[in-house]
């Protein structure tokens, strides 16, 4: 998880685009214990690279059975 407040420090992505992704559910958000918003880095990277976690899990399962 990455703090939404410090997100601009680690990324050059447009904040409005990220907020749109968060609102659409493509990128996951959570609330930290202190009440601050955090972003799931895995879902953000999956969205940016076009990876589908369901397909990735299937590919991993297929490799294990081969």
Image: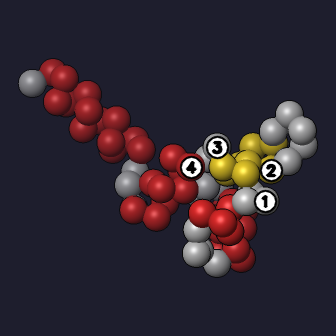
Mark 4 nearby-residue class (10 Å; few <14, some 14–19, many ≥20): some
Q: Pointer 1 and pointer 2: residues touching (CB < 8 Å)?
A: yes
Which residue does the numbered mark 4 point to in the structure image?
41
Label placed on residue 37 = 2
Residue 7: horizontal and vertical position, in percent? Answer: 68, 62
Say whether disc 3 or disc 4 marks the residue closer to the N-terminus: 3
Q: Pointer 1 and pointer 4: residues touching (CB < 8 Å)?
A: no
Disc 1 from disc 4: Cα separation: 14 Å
Label placed on residue 55 = none
Residue 19: horizontal and vertical position, in percent? Answer: 72, 67
- Tell me the SS state at disc 3: loop
Can residue 20 be seen here?
A: no
On the picture, is 18 further left or further right than 41?
right
- Tell me the SS state at disc 4: helix
Which residue does the numbered mark 3 point to in the structure image?
1
Say whether disc 1 or disc 4 marks the residue closer to the N-terminus: 1
Q: Is residue 8 above or below residue 42?
A: below
Disc 1 from disc 3: Cα separation: 12 Å
On the picture, is 59 further left or further right than 21?
left
Q: Is residue 20 above or below residue 63?
A: below
Which residue does the numbered mark 1 point to in the structure image?
5
Q: Nearer the viewer, residue 56 or 8?
A: 8
Say whether disc 3 or disc 2 marks the residue closer to the N-terminus: 3
Mark 1 nearby-residue class (10 Å; few <14, some 14–19, many ≥20): few
Q: Is residue 48 above or below residue 57?
A: below
Residue at 48% over, 56% down: 45
Q: Pointer 3 and pointer 4: residues touching (CB < 8 Å)?
A: yes
């Amino acid at each position: 998880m990455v703090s939404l407040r410090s997100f601009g420090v680690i990324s050059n992505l447009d904040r409005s685009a990220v907020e749109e992704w968060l609102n659409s559910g493509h990128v996951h958000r959570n609330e930290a214990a202190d009440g601050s918003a955090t972003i799931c880095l895995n879902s953000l990277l999956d969205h940016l690279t076009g990876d589908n976690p369901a397909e990735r899990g299937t590919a991993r399962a297929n490799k294990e059975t081969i």
